[in-house]
Image (cartoon, rainbow, N blue to C red):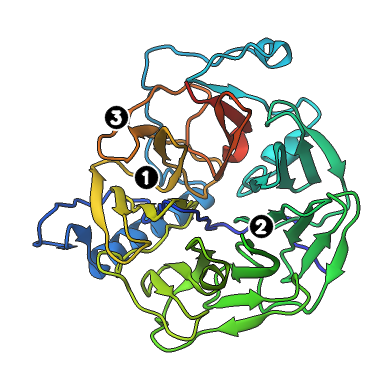
């Protein structure tokens, strides 16, 4: 097996739940809530998104070549704010409402930013059956926390270098089942909580760019491929995969991120998906397992950037960050409306109390304002939130867990480490 020593110059990411948020172009696109200009129903049309994506790709290429292609980093939202020291992590006294760096001293610098165009730790995920347990897949193997993301220990060293993306997944079996993607198009599976892994099934045409587990069936997986068109499905825990296209699936896109939409029914959840592309096509939904696809009103032009995107679901409400704000659906993705406008966002997560959005993209080493925004549920009114100066760009990935008192977000901030946020 041949494994590349460095990550590609550009990359992509995202994820889903009951409220949907989807990240779009990394360039801020003017938008209005009325038709006109380069908008359609308050959202950017395909030509505007294509122009913005082209501009971003050119900038990312310049950075990869050592040029100043990205915006200068924005200042912290509060003057001189610094993150709490690591002492509060060990003492369990970290304050709520601020990000705290919990990157373990034992995590080598090579995992955070080994060389130019390498992006730091990969995906962070929560075990759905054990909220204490979180996992991070990184270049040096698998790391685990058993205390809600406070401290981390490397539990496995034999995994290959993963592609960037949502490239690990966890099912709440006992013990936990864990999947980890490899850059060569193969996938590894552990059925003992990460103690051992086996190489599964056939290699795919390219590396998996996301691994999503059916919330009602731990053997049912979805994935998109890095820089390749198409959505893939496995019904046997990753041993075999098949391409699903179906009527209405758009052409011309790459790096698809498909997600299950939880309908509240196991049968329909297994068949109901949303898929978000890069560089073309449109966001589409299916309710028959990929047999037929349609572009929902308000999302026909939505694409994710070369970077990170995360979708969040709560009940029948879905939120998506689209590059210049956030859109929301209250009917499981059938229709959409703008709820935040004017702030570049690409990753969204939430709790019963709040919805959060942040801005980050696949570039190393890049710095830009993370644009941390929060809205009380149901997500109507948004405001900026202070961030420490140690976070110059938003996260690749965020996982949310609950310790019985507080909701806790744990994010992987590219080469700037692992940070933890306790909801006030």
Q: Quadrant of residue 187?
A: bottom right
User: Picture coordinates of residue 193 (x, y %)?
Assistant: 84, 49
Q: Earlier in the sequence, mark 1 or mark 2?
A: 2
**Residue for point 82% across, 52% down:** 174
**Residue for point 34% across, 63% down:** 302
Determine whether the residue tagged by mark 3 lies in a helix, strand or loop. strand
On screen, residue 368 above or below 185:
above
**Label pair 2/3, CB-CB below 8 angstroms:** no
Query: Which residue lies under the disc numbered 3?
Result: 383
Query: Which residue lies under the disc numbered 1?
Result: 345
Q: Badge 3, how many Cα within 10 Å: few under 14, some, many 20+?
A: few
Q: CA distance from mark 1 to mark 2?
A: 21 Å
Residue 1 seen anywhere in this rendered image of the structure: no
User: Picture coordinates of residue 421 (x, y %)?
Assistant: 54, 26
On screen, residue 389 above or below 182:
above
Determine whether the residue tagged by mark 2 lies in a helix, strand or loop. loop
Q: Earlier in the sequence, mark 2 or mark 3?
A: 2
107 lies left or right of 12: right
Q: In the picture, which quadrant includes the N terminus?
A: bottom right
Query: Which residue lies under the disc numbered 2?
Result: 167
Circle 1 or circle 3, nearest the eye: 3
Q: Badge 2, how many Cα within 10 Å: few under 14, some, many 20+?
A: many
Instruction: State the residue in front, 180 or 78.
Output: 180
Q: CA distance from mark 1 to mark 3?
A: 13 Å
Instruction: State the residue in front, 123 or 125.
Output: 125
**Label pair 1/3, CB-CB below 8 angstroms:** no
**Residue for point 80% across, 63% down:** 188
Circle 2 or circle 3, nearest the eye: 3
Residue at the outermost bottom position = 247
Residue 354 seen anywhere in this rendered image of the structure: yes
């Amino acid at each position: 097996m041949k494994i590349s020593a460095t990550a590609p110059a550009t990359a992509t990411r995202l994820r889903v739940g009951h409220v949907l948020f989807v990240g779009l172009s990394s360039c801020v696109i003017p938008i209005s809530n009325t038709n006109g200009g380069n908008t359609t129903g308050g959202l950017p049309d395909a030509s505007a998104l294509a122009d913005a994506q082209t501009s971003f790709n050119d900038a990312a290429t310049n950075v990869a070549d050592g040029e100043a292609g990205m915006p200068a980093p924005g200042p912290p939202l509060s003057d001189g704010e610094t993150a709490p020291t690591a002492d509060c992590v060990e003492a369990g006294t970290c304050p709520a409402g601020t990000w705290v760096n919990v990157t373990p001293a034992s995590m080598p610098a090579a995992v955070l930013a080994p060389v130019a165009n390498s992006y730091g730790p990969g995906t962070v995920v929560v075990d759905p059956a054990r909220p204490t347990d979180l996992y991070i897949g990184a270049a040096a193997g698998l790391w685990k926390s058993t205390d809600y993301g406070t401290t981390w220990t490397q539990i496995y060293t034999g995994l290959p270098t993963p592609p960037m993306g949502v490239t690990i997944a966890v099912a709440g079996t006992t013990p936990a089942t864990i999947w980890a993607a490899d850059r060569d198009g193969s996938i590894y599976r552990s059925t003992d909580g990460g103690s051992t892994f086996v190489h599964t099934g056939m290699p795919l045409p390219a590396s998996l760019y996301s691994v999503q587990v059916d919330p009602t069936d731990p053997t049912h997986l979805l994935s998109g491929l890095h820089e390749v068109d198409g959505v893939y499905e496995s019904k046997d825990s990753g041993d075999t995969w098949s391409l699903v296209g179906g009527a209405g699936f758009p052409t011309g896109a790459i790096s698809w991120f498909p997600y299950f939409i939880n309908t509240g029914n196991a049968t329909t959840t297994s068949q109901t998906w949303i898929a978000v592309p890069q560089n073309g096509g449109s966001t589409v939904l299916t309710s028959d397992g990929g047999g037929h696809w349609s572009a929902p009103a308000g999302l026909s032009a939505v694409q994710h950037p070369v970077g990170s995107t995360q979708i969040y679901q709560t009940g029948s409400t879905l939120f998506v960050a689209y590059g210049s704000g956030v859109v929301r659906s209250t009917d499981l993705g059938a229709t959409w409306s703008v709820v935040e406008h004017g702030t570049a966002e690409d990753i969204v997560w939430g709790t019963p109390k709040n919805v959060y959005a942040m801005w980050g993209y696949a570039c190393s080493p890049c710095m830009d304002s993370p644009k941390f925004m929060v809205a009380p549920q149901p997500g109507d009114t948004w405001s900026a939130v202070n961030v420490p100066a140690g976070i110059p760009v938003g996260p690749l990935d965020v996982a949310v867990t609950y310790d019985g008192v507080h909701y806790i977000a744990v994010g992987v901030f590219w080469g700037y480490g692992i940070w933890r946020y306790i909801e006030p």
